[in-house]
Image (cartoon, rainbow, N blue to C red):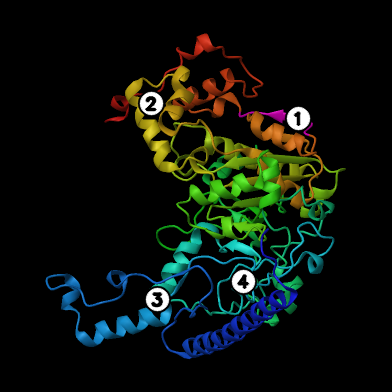
Amino acid sequence: MPATVSDDTLSLILSQLQSLTASQAALQAKVDALSHASVEALSRSSTPSAPVSSPLRATFSPPSSLAPSSPPAGQLDSLIPNSERAERKDKDKNLYPHRVIITTYPDQAGIKPVPLIWGASDPKSRGPIVCSRLPTSIKLRNAIGAHSGSYSIYRALAIAIGTLSPSHKPDYSQTEPPVDIPPQPSWFDPKRIVSFDPWGHLAPTVFKDDIDGGLDVRPSIAITKAHIKMSELDVSSASGDLPIDGKIVIASRPLLDADGKVSTANPGVELRTAKAAVEPVWYLPGVAERFGISEALLRRALFEDTGGMYPELITRPDIKVFLPPIGGLTAYIFGPPEYMSDSSKELTLRVHDECNGSDVFGSDICTCKPYLVFAIEEAVRCAQRGGVGVVIYFRKEGRALGEVTKYLVYNLRKRGGDSADKYFKSTELVAGVKDMRFQALMPDVLHWLGITKIDNMVSMSDMKYNAIVESGIPILKRYDIPEHLIPPDSRVEIDAKIAAGYFTSGKKVTEADLIKTVGRTWEETDH
């Protein structure tokens, strides 16, 4: 029979474990105190420096080959004076210690995330988003990642070269939204908005006590007002299609001629708009549910296929929020913003995915810019009729495949004969998939704005249409871009989409017709 352990022995083991835990906590407190003192000293120095991190579990000491050292003779760094080289070594040590914190675990001493209940009935109950790794926040974090999406990399670079202090405390006074986007019932539904923080634009106000208490809480949404000036709008106004109303469409200031005198030329028009920039903040259980996968699989995929960038996706299952390093979105509102949540008002919508080549530089291989301009004009016309127009601009370049992949596909199309029957196949050959925009998260912004009904949707995409309707927002009418606005070389794209089942109010295109639709060759562009 196995030997039994006496109660006295168990009590002794328990006592020793408690003593060890207390000692570890005391040691950690001393280290934290030293870290805080180091940060305060660094923040007072003339050169911005990063905080000294606490040595938590899962740390890593880099080999001496990775530590700062004098470069071998013959390299450019050998020309640096010894005094400057020593200064650089000191800066490296001040910025980041050689004990690297790779990850944390829920059961570590002192780990106590700020409580966060996604979809709670008020911001205080919900709690702020805290992702900072500063010593004052690292044990309190309830989110993985960093603010600013992909731009967080530039922040890291600014800290490394000494142009930004990591302990800089933003001053949010007078940055409040000039346009009110008030709480909506959808904000309090943990399944309705899962891809960004609905309180993001109000964070400096509703979480002021937390900020004053030392937490690094930052806004992930900013709202402002602006004027839009586009040459296409000038043409529409001059033709009478976009009349000046003095409220939404206004005349531009007079132009000056070469002599500095007021010109008699038509200065065109400008559009008044309110706009909101939104950074992604993912509630992982909700995102996983949208895509019909487990949270564990989502976390593993995000970890593995970003090169292991965020180990805490695996080691911190208690943290449910992730700030991914991707582009966000911008919402443009034409007309009274309060009309968006008023179902008695007409609402026109365009959800547009980024296309730098067309939207900015006017490439005619696709219909992106003509579609965007047409949708803006339709949104304005709706507002002029007494409704409101909304254009949502997502940063999903090249169907979320990126511009490099997009250009590789262009090369394949032009070399292989750019016909509509090969349109989607060309993308699949390069990328392995024809589209990665996955519109399941897209309706979140509509629920945030309070939209409950869409009268007019300017879009051919069934993916967008289905995602919106399935989220509970009815669409009464949808329509596509007029034929006369389609550039000849983009006919390949349009016909391929129509044949694939995209919505169209015009002619129907069959698979047999696609071989007849051919794009311009490279030779035709050489002059």
Give the percent coordinates (x, y) of residue 386: 80, 45
Q: Nearer the viewer, mark 1 or mark 2?
A: 2
Residue placed under numbered mark 3 in the picture: 98
Q: Determine the CA span between mark 1 and mark 2.
A: 34 Å
Residue 90 visible at all = yes
Q: Nearer the viewer, mark 2 or mark 4?
A: 4
Q: Sequence order check: which comes first, mark 1 or mark 2?
A: 2
Residue placed under numbered mark 2 in the picture: 413
Q: Determine the CA span between mark 2 and mark 4.
A: 55 Å
Write the start and end of the magenta stretch as one range: 475-481
- Quadrant of res 437: top right
Q: Determine the CA span between mark 2 and mark 3.
A: 50 Å
Under mark 4, the amino acid is Gln
Residue placed under numbered mark 1 in the picture: 477
Q: Determine the CA span between mark 3 and mark 1.
A: 61 Å
**In the rendered view, does 422 fall on the left or right side of 104?**
left
